[in-house]
């Protein structure tokens, strides 16, 4: 599925983002829980994650119509765009809502970082096709 994402302000990634994956196998297919990437200012957290091979769920394609890309911003929230009303309304539907909850498709990277993002273990549709890029064609549950 393609993702609607903002146009980055720069061509080369310059912002450090640390992802903490509660269920790394579901997101990357590997066991590494702590992954550091570089992202471009202006991009979304979701877009940067997908570019780095981190398959954060995004059932609506990044248009703020679901809450499957819900993450926790553990640090660096001042380097992100402020949440708009549509995001605040939608994120309330996510399980395990916390004060630092955001929709990764709506978090636009504006500052210089670093930013720490935690991806909850439940960040998967209950039933979906095999992870993006997988050759498996059977349904998986998670």
Image (tube, helix red, strand yellow):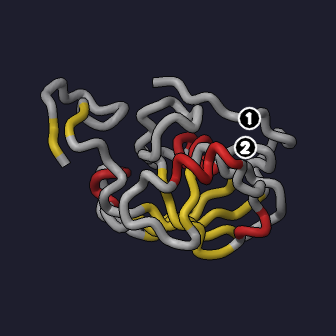
> Residue 107's x, y, as percent?
67, 51
Q: Are marks 1 and 2 in contact (CB under 8 Å)?
A: yes
> Residue 82's x, y, as percent?
76, 57
* Mark 2 secondary-structure assignment: loop
Q: Which residue is mark 1?
A: 6
Q: Nearer the viewer, residue 89 or 22?
A: 89
Q: Is residue 124 above or below residue 6?
A: below
* Picture residue at 57% right of the left edge, 64% below the top: 36
Say whether disc 1 or disc 2 marks the residue closer to the N-terminus.
Answer: 1
* Mark 1 secondary-structure assignment: loop
* Picture residue at 20% right of the left edge, 37% below the top: 127
Query: How many badges with numbers are in the image?
Result: 2
Q: Which residue is mark 2?
A: 43
Q: Nearer the viewer, residue 12 or 1?
A: 1
User: Dot 1: within a 10 Å radius of its alpha carbon, few (fewer than 14), some, or many (20 or more) residues?
Assistant: some
* Picture residue at 13% right of the left edge, 28% below the top: 138
Q: Nearer the viewer, residue 97 or 129?
A: 97
Viewed as shown, does residue 11 lie left or right of 1?
right
User: Dot 2: within a 10 Å radius of its alpha carbon, few (fewer than 14), some, or many (20 or more) residues?
Assistant: many
> Residue 76's x, y, as percent?
71, 71
> Residue 27's x, y, as percent?
36, 51
Residue 69: mark? none
Picture quarter with the N terminus = top left
Viewed as shown, does residue 84 lie left or right of 27?
right
> Label 1 to label 2, Cα distance in Å?
6 Å
């Amino acid at each position: 599925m393609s993702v609607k994402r903002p146009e980055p302000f720069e061509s080369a990634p310059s912002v450090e983002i640390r992802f903490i994956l509660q269920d790394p196998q579901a997101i990357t297919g590997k066991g590494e829980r702590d992954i550091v990437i570089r992202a471009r200012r202006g991009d979304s957290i979701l877009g940067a994650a997908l570019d780095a091979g981190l398959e954060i769920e995004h059932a609506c394609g990044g248009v703020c119509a679901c809450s499957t890309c819900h993450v926790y911003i553990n640090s660096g929230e001042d380097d992100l765009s402020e949440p708009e009303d549509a995001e605040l309304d939608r994120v309330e539907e996510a399980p395990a809502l916390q004060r630092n909850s955001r929709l990764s498709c709506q978090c636009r990277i504006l500052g210089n970082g670093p930013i720490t993002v935690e991806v909850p273990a439940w960040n998967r549709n209950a039933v979906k096709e095999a992870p993006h890029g997988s050759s498996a064609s059977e349904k998986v549950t998670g």
